[in-house]
Image (cartoon, rainbow, N blue to C red):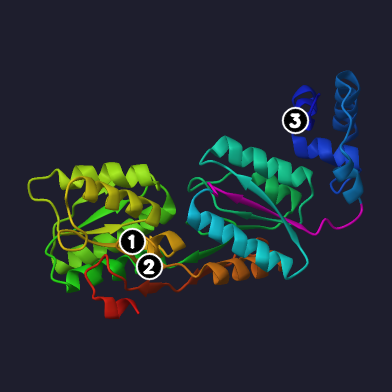
Amino acid sequence: MPTRNDVAKLAGTSAAVVSYVLNDGPRNVSPATREKVLRAVAELGYRPNGVARALRGGRSRTIGLIVPDNSNPFFATLARAVEDAAFAQDYAVLLGNSTESTDREQRYLSTFLERQVEAILLISVDGEPELAEVHRVGTPVVLLDRQVPGGDASSVVVDNAGGANEATRHLLDHGHATVACVSGPTGLPVADERFRGWREAVRAAGGAEVSVPAPFTRAGGYAAAAELLAAHDRPTAVFVASEQQAIGVLRAAADRGVRVPADLALVTFDGTEDGEFAHPPLTTVRQPVERLAARAMDVLLAGGDRTPEHHVLPFELLLRRSCGCGQEAAQ
């Protein structure tokens, strides 16, 4: 069965333009392009779906949300918070998983435009999402969790550098001479900001800069920890840039007989339920998920990308057992 993308390819245009032709708007299309689209529709035998026709001339009351991977507990929790914030304002949420693929992210953006969502929330795969088509159509878009420096879209993020800095200083205050870092993927703004916060704290203390970049996954954390723990002068403390990585670090330490926190103190970032129920429970920089979602919805519904606004929300350092604090500190 032919798709709207097939029509766009044959007509030499975009899926969004095909949508404008089939729905008589909301944007004008030149007569020549309209003729190409209609010719492609006839040639392929394409039948427009009922959803697009039903939306014609009305409001969809839908928000598009694109996350890297909602099997990651942090993104699952954030997606639920967005859904709750949207539901409170009588909006439904369409969810897409980019699986950290820029191509898949772009396809979801095009699909959401075809579905005529009223706004889009994007947790981008990289530091330079392609938003030209979204801006051309005029659909409000807000970047959530991952800010793009100098970008032309509004953003709502937590203070990543500040959180990483405080987490690292907490370990330094415990008396550790070397606080290593399991950082995120190089070039991803959120990972770079957390790395910067760690590095500034270490430099201010005159410590050694020992770091290993890794994907934001358990396997990534495991591999990075294996490298750090194999060193002759292995660190006694580590800042781990995400809780999923931290779960992998705990496993790597256990496999090598390294006790946390007695032999390796650990502080991480995110604040999901996984960290609370890990063994030992993880000291973590908690992101205010509900506030992130609520603020992003407020900016979206105000058409925030027309005059970009950048919101940086505060974090909270939750003291638990993995850093070496006593049980009383975790209460």
Q: Tell me where the magenta segment starts and ends, as one range.
A: 57-70
Question: Disc 1 marks which amino acid?
Answer: Thr
Residue 5: mark in rendering: 3
Secondary structure beneath disc 3? helix
The CA distance from mark 2 to mark 1 is 6 Å
The CA distance from mark 3 to mark 2 is 42 Å
State the residue position of label 2.
Answer: 285
Q: Quadrant location of residue 110?
A: top right
Secondary structure beneath disc 1? strand
Name of the residue lying farthest toward the left: 232
Q: Quadrant location of residue 16?
A: top right
Screen quadrant of the C terminus: bottom left
Crowd class of label 2 (few under 14; some 14 to 19; many from 20; radius 10 Å): many
Q: Residue at x 75, y 58 (%)?
A: 92
Crowd class of label 3 (few under 14; some 14 to 19; many from 20; radius 10 Å): some
Q: Which is more toward the observer, 255 or 117?
A: 255
